[in-house]
Image (cartoon, rainbow, N blue to C red):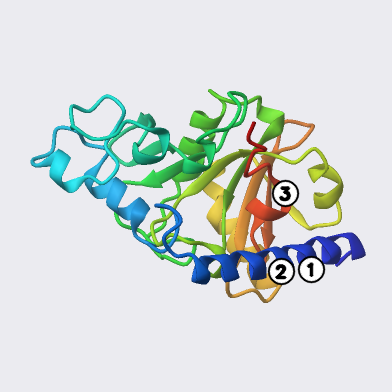
Amino acid sequence: MSQQYESIMTNNRKWLSVLLSVFFCFPRLGLSMGNSDILRDIVQHCVDTGSANYCQQCRAPTLDSVCPTEKSCQKTTEVWAMNQDFVAIRDIKMCGCPAEFVHGLVLPRQIITGVEDPRRPQAIWDYAWQVAITRMQPPSIALVINPQNFRSQNQMHIHLLRLNPQANLSLSPLQAVEITDLKDVWRVADQSAKAQALQDYGVLVRLDATGRFKVVVTPESPEKLFTQYACQKP
């Protein structure tokens, strides 16, 4: 493992320590903190506006719903795309950000916990990519799932993000597996994790300069290590 990667991981451990201290000191700062079932609740109660008692059951109604609730960014669900298996929504981190900032989430509509769940769907990566390319240029796209120990929610979600400008340098020392079919992501991620003796791991999928997909497995959060996951708000 390179010194550069070790430095990145050390900095992110410090960041996580600060985040956890804020989390436990201020558990009521917002919807995204203190509740690990928010995304599960959205999948079950908020994406289907035609369900019975929608306004009573959904804590963050869609922007076009008729619910008599506040329509602010932080208190609504913005659905980007949906089919019978998956839904793509805006992440709450986009609220208050410049228009060019993108942070989306793709979730299975079935209840699935995360990277460790044996029911994780193969097709979620291809669906996430198809949504991502409608909002970002392919060379800049990062599809990410965080390790179990680095996530705040217990409903599987793939982050749709832009790579950091320095990501190529950070990723270059890491072992990446090349694939041509996104249905192979889980298989090669498992193999890479096993080779690194990792029981818990995160996954980053990106497109390289040759137009092939690369899968990178890390023991810490790829979201924090390699992507523009938050914006500088005006």
Q: Is residue 96 left or right of residue 191?
A: left
- SS at circle 2: helix
Q: Are marks 3 and 1 in contact (CB under 8 Å)?
A: no
Rendering coords of residue 217 (x, y %): 67, 59
> As drawn, is 149 to the left or to the right of 62?
right
- The CA span between labels 3 and 2 is 14 Å
Q: Position of residue 118 (x, y in %)?
A: 41, 65
- Can residue 181 be seen here? no
- Mark 3 and mark 1: Cα distance apart in space: 14 Å
Which of the marked residues, 3 or 1, is nearer the chain's N terminus?
1
Q: Position of residue 186 (x, y in %)?
A: 54, 56
**Callout 2, which amino acid?**
Arg
Query: Which quadrant would residue 5 be assigned to in this image?
Result: bottom right
Q: Earlier in the sequence, mark 3 or mark 2?
A: 2
Q: Which residue is mark 1?
A: 10
**135, above or below 178, in the image:** above
Q: Residue furthest left?
A: 52
Nearer the viewer's eye, disc 3 or disc 1? 1
* Image depth: mark 3 or mark 2 in front: 2
- The local secondary structure at tag 3 comes to helix
Crowd class of label 1 (few under 14; some 14 to 19; many from 20; radius 10 Å)? few
- State the image coordinates of residue 211 (x, y, percent, origin top left): 72, 31
For label 3, the residue is 226
Identify which amino acid the numbered label 1 is placed on: Thr
Whether residue 191 is situated above or below residue 101 in the rendered picture: below
Task: Looking at the picture, tell me which residue is in the foreground, 98 or 142.
Answer: 98
Report the residue marked by disc 2: 13
Q: Secondary structure at mark 1?
A: helix
Q: Amino acid type of disc 3?
A: Phe
Q: Residue at x 36, y 51 (%)?
A: 39
* Residue most extreme to the right: 3
